[in-house]
Amino acid sequence: MDHNKQEIIVQHAGAINGPLLIFGGVYSNLQALEAMREVAERAGFSPDRIICTGDIVGYCADPEACVQGIKDWGIQAIAGNVELQLRDGEDECGCNFDEGSRCDLLSRQWYPFAQSQPSADSLAWMRTLPHHLQLTLGGRLVYVLHGSWHNPSEFVFQSTPWPAKAANFEATQADIILAGHCGLPFLDQKEGKTWFNAGVIGMPANDGTTRVWYAILDVNDAGAVIGTHHALTYDFATAAERMRTHRLPASYALTLSTGIWDNCDILPAIETNAQGQPLFE
């Protein structure tokens, strides 16, 4: 289904006080999700101050448990492209991989498994997820989206030219955009606007470590937007073993242990050249 032609559903969350915890890309990695919830609860984040930027389902072995885990946690979440495809009964992941690319070929292995797992209850819950979430934080208008305003499968990176990001600010009139999809954490601030990608918790960030990433966002008393990235450690060995048990792509299971992506098909040159370099150090 062409999601660009669907009516865009925006959920209005109102004003939120205090910092937000943001993560995305659970990718069916139950061990990472359980670690994320433990960290959030230990830090005192209530569910209304936690946001998932989509792609709860993905490469790893526990799609149903992860969907139910997010649902039961009661946090705020939007639909990623994978949830949109699953709930619409589509036969591919909708990730915007180039046809015939390595990512495309591997998706033909993991997506059928992901499609076979969710219960009717999980699919019904996915249909309640909005495309975007709107809220205010410290008087700043915040939009949560997956890829971009017009396309949940658009890859937007740190190196993506600012005019492409500016078009999203123009469409939303937002001060802050919280995005997902690309798999890499970054903060880009220009012209009084903030594009903030928390990164993902389901796969490492191609930096040669097993760490995964979440973020915290706040607006201080002076009105400055403060976004910080934080590493999450979890039981990656169990997550990888569960992938092997279910005969999911071995190269993605290996990535959990090495921190290096199988390929850089989706990455611009700048991000490709940064492969294996630890982040935020």
Image (cartoon, helix red, strand yellow):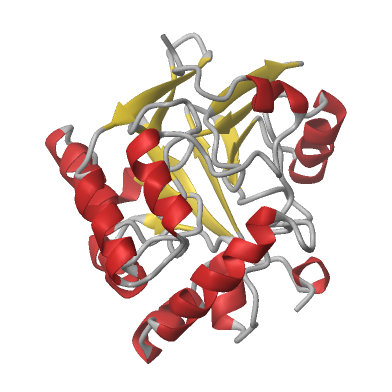
Residue 18 percent coordinates (x, y) = 34, 30
Query: Does residue 86 lie above or below 155 as drawn?
Result: below
Identify which residue is drawn at 53% across, 71% down: 109
Residue 43 percent coordinates (x, y) = 18, 32
Q: Quadrant of residue 159?
A: top right
Q: Is residue 73 left or right of residue 194?
A: left
Identify which residue is drawn at 33% across, 62% down: 243
Kindly give the residue lying farthest to the left in the view shown. Answer: 42
120, 143: nearer the viewer: 120
Q: Is residue 40 visible?
A: yes
Q: Is residue 168 left or right of residue 214?
A: right
Q: Is residue 62 left or right of residue 80?
A: left
Identify which residue is drawn at 33% across, 33% down: 210
Query: Does residue 164 lie above or below 118 as drawn?
Result: above
Residue 162 percent coordinates (x, y) = 81, 25
* Label tally: 0
Q: Is residue 235 left or right of residue 173?
A: left
Query: Does residue 7 lie above or below 24 as drawn?
Result: below
117, 71: nearer the viewer: 117
220, 278: nearer the viewer: 278
The quarter of the rendered structure image containing the C terminus is: top left
Q: Is residue 201 visible?
A: no
Query: Does residue 63 lie above or below 225 as drawn?
Result: below
The quarter of the rendered structure image containing the N terminus is: bottom right
Identify which residue is drawn at 84% across, 35% down: 164
Residue 40 percent coordinates (x, y) = 22, 40
Q: Quadrant of residue 230?
A: top left
211, 257: nearer the viewer: 257
